[in-house]
Image: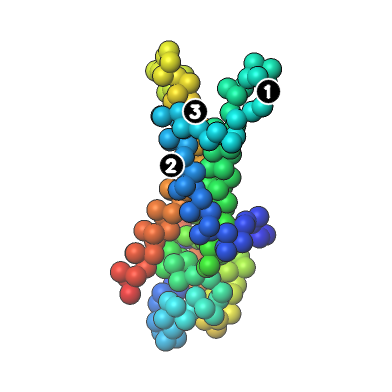
């Protein structure tokens, strides 16, 4: 059974977009950086929004580009890569759940929504980090063995 | 699961790269199988057996706890 993955050619552009959107998300979260052309014409109250779509655009862009980067086919994609992806997914979901429990029980007040906002990306970030690190370590081990 | 891929591969004169190319997987996969870190699917096991010219039972062996 072939896994449902994006083509390999998407990987590099997705990585570049992930880095760009990642920086923009941090700027938006920490310094309220907003793009004026994304301001809404209607009064904010009417739309239950802060009156600017910058954060929505940045967050969606970051999540989508990270998703495509993490799930785009490798040049040498095979059944072993699929098993590594599965292991990375299990790790990411477990870690995400444990972090969620820790956040709920240990973080209070204004810090909670801030931490929760960053926590939106934990599953994908952990999955990508775990999977790519494993691949790199295996490549190094293979090269060393020869 | 114990396997004799490495021994048979060397005996047949294949490098990891050559065996990987012939079986259509990555070199890392062959390394992971040889070191026991990954148990291949039936399809890959059969492909390895065909390339190495041995029956599957000669390449893979169940251990007592399997």
The label number, if any, that marks residue A63 in the structure image: none
Q: Chain of mark 1?
A: A
Question: Would residue B16 be visible to someone looking at this image?
Answer: yes
Q: Chain of mark 3?
A: A
Residue, disc 3? A117
For the C terminus of chain A, give its image quadrant: bottom left
> Dot 2 lies on which element?
helix
> Dot 3 lies on which element?
helix
| Mark pair 3, 2: CA separation | 15 Å
Expressed as whole percent of the image width and height from the top left, the position of residue A138 reads: 39, 61
Question: Would residue B66 be visible to someone looking at this image?
Answer: no
Position of residue B8 relative to residue A33, above or below, is: below
**Horizontal side of residue B43 vs A101, given as left or right:** right
Q: Looking at this view, is A132 or B18 the one in front?
A: A132
Residue at image position (61%, 65%) is B42
Residue, disc 1? A42
| Mark pair 3, 1: CA separation | 26 Å
The answer to which of marks 2 and 1 sits earlier in the sequence is: 2
Residue at image position (43%, 42%) is A23
Residue, disc 2? A23
Expressed as whole percent of the image width and height from the top left, the position of residue B10 reads: 40, 82
| Mark pair 2, 1: CA separation | 28 Å
């Amino acid at each position: 059974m072939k896994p449902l993955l994006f083509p390999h050619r998407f990987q590099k552009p997705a990585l570049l977009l992930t880095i760009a959107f990642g920086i923009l998300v941090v700027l938006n979260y920490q310094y309220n950086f907003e793009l004026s052309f994304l301001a809404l014409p209607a009064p904010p109250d009417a739309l239950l929004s802060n009156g600017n779509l910058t954060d929505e655009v940045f967050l969606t862009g970051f999540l989508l580009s990270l998703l495509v980067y993490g799930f785009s086919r490798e040049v040498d994609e095979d059944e072993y890569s699929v098993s590594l992806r599965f292991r990375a997914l299990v790790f990411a979901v477990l870690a995400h759940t444990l972090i969620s429990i820790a956040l709920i029980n240990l973080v209070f007040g204004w810090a909670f929504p801030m931490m929760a906002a960053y926590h939106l990306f934990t599953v994908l970030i952990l999955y990508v980090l775990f999977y790519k690190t494993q691949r790199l370590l295996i490549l190094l081990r293979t090269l060393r063995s020869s | 699961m114990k396997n004799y891929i490495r021994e048979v591969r060397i005996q047949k004169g294949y490098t990891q790269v050559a065996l990987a190319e012939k079986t259509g997987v990555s070199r890392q996969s062959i390394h992971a199988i040889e070191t026991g870190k990954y148990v291949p699917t039936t399809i890959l096991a059969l492909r390895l057996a065909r390339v190495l010219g041995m029956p599957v039972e000669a390449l893979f062996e169940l251990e007592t706890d399997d």
